[in-house]
Amino acid sequence: MHRRIIVPGALGAASLMLAIPASAAAHSPGAPGIGDPYYPAYGNGGYDVSHYDLRLKYQPATDRLEGTATILARTTADLSRFNLDFLLDVGEVRVNGAKASFTTSGEHELEITPKKPLDKGAPLTVVVRYSGVPSSKQAYGFTSWHRTPDGGVGANEPEAAWWWFPSNDHPLDKATYDVSVQVPDGTQAISNGTLQSTSSRLGWTRWNWRSDKPQATYLATLAVGKFDLTTGTTESGVPVVNAYSRDLGANDGAARASVERTGEVADWLSGYFGPYPFNALGGYVPNTTTGYALETQTRPFYSPRQFANGSNVSVVVHELAHQWYGDLVSVHGWKDIWINEGFARYAQWLWSEHEGEGTAQELADYTYASHPADDAFWTVRPGDPGPENQFDAAVYDRGALALQALRNRVGDEDFFAILKGWPTKHAYGNASVADFQRYAEEVSGEPLATLFDTWLFQPSKPDAPAAPSESLAKTSEPSRGAETPAQPRSWRKIAATNGVHGH
């Protein structure tokens, strides 16, 4: 906490200054935000996290969560104090082994003052012991914790971590994870990555999950309840774990008929985007009342409502496309959301081609014609939509139209080279819309500023993305070596377009 000390007289003030070591005087509090203009209080300044170790105990009957988070990081500035983003009740904080003082501020800030100032570039180990009932906590008038009949789920965008672990909550600070969760026997705990082990003792079962590749905080997930688990592998050998709440009712069959195709879809997408970038895969469908789906890394979250009208493989395509566009390469800032959503929507259009249900060009023409020039749809700028429109339908559909326009401009060969090369260029890192434009120009050799400005930044209806000229028209199936594939064909998670909710 800030503390103001008043010392009478000039001599007293001089004595105080002499009493403060010069090294300590140079240290200052870390910023309470990482610098994202959409969400100024999200993330924090002064350190970079490399690993989260979360050891949790959850009681489904009461929604009570107890945990110890060990955070490994390195300072990026001389710090007298630093923040974590968190909502639950904190009992103790240790910094590099010593007890630290702490307080809370704002909607979700945990302010930590270590016993000794921290020098720039030093290793940092933070241990936070905490407890609470996640469903009882709100920030900015909402919650990202879903209470279910037999447990709870942490999944939302752009924030979810606050309700179950303290973090530097912004995609710019990715880290690896170990998530160990103790739950009553007969209950399952689902998280990201690979299941390392389970063990039972004294009526409790501990589930140990590991994510060994960098992962943004909003992509970390936890689901506790009574699930049926299925396992398998993709053709490329990636293990697949899917989980379904046992009380999905009428939606159960359609959910399984969709999510069980996860391995097939991931293998298909790898032809467009390159090899699947993680060592685990799957999806889970808890019994929640919300409507959206989310690309939680390696194990997407699907609401049962996604399958209310029958099987919905398209939403699986959308969330798995995010494993490359959104997870492997994450936004630099939240204004760059088009890099996630426009590409995941376009993947659905490519899947439609693959299934013989309409080509990407046909879907682009249909989407374009569905919105007259005076439709507010065209006033949303996908390249910088503002936080209030971050998940607006236009970010998805106009975003996909921009890609069809790019494809028609540069031709299939360069377009698919861009789609596959981009995830490799920025693998496990972050990038912006401007970065993508530069990359597309580099690969195609074409000046594309006007095209990107027209489709992503102008608040008006552009001219239609004309079909490619005959000289540019090629197959829309990417090169896959020896393979012979089939011929292709609220401002949070609330967007719904083309009958598919997906983020």
Image (tube, rainbow, N blue to C red):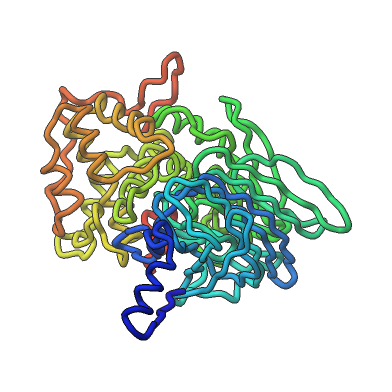
Say which residue appears at 63% left-offset and 33% top-offset: 239
Rendered location of residue 199, percent (x, y): 81, 47
* Left or right of residue 61: residue 104: left
| Looking at the image, residue 65 lies above or below residue 71 | below
Q: Is residue 42 visible?
A: no
Number of marks in the image? 0
Say which residue appears at 70% left-offset and 46% top-offset: 208
Which residue is more in the foreground, 283 or 496? 283
Instruction: Please identify the residue farthest to the right as the structure is shown.
Output: 202
Say which residue appears at 73% left-offset and 49% top-offset: 207
Rendered location of residue 85, percent (x, y): 49, 64
| Looking at the image, residue 287 lies above or below residue 125 | below
Instruction: Please identify the residue farthest to the top as the structure is shown.
Output: 482
Rendered location of residue 37, percent (x, y): 29, 62
Which residue is more in the foreground, 347 or 105? 105
* Left or right of residue 180: residue 172: left
| Looking at the image, residue 60 lies above or below residue 475 | below
Instruction: Please identify the residue farthest to the bottom as the structure is shown.
Output: 8
Which residue is more in the foreground, 181 or 260? 181
Q: Is residue 39 visible?
A: yes
Rendered location of residue 187, percent (x, y): 76, 57
* Left or right of residue 174: residue 259: right
| Looking at the image, residue 140 lies above or below residue 458 | below
Say which residue appears at 41% left-offset and 20% top-offset: 480
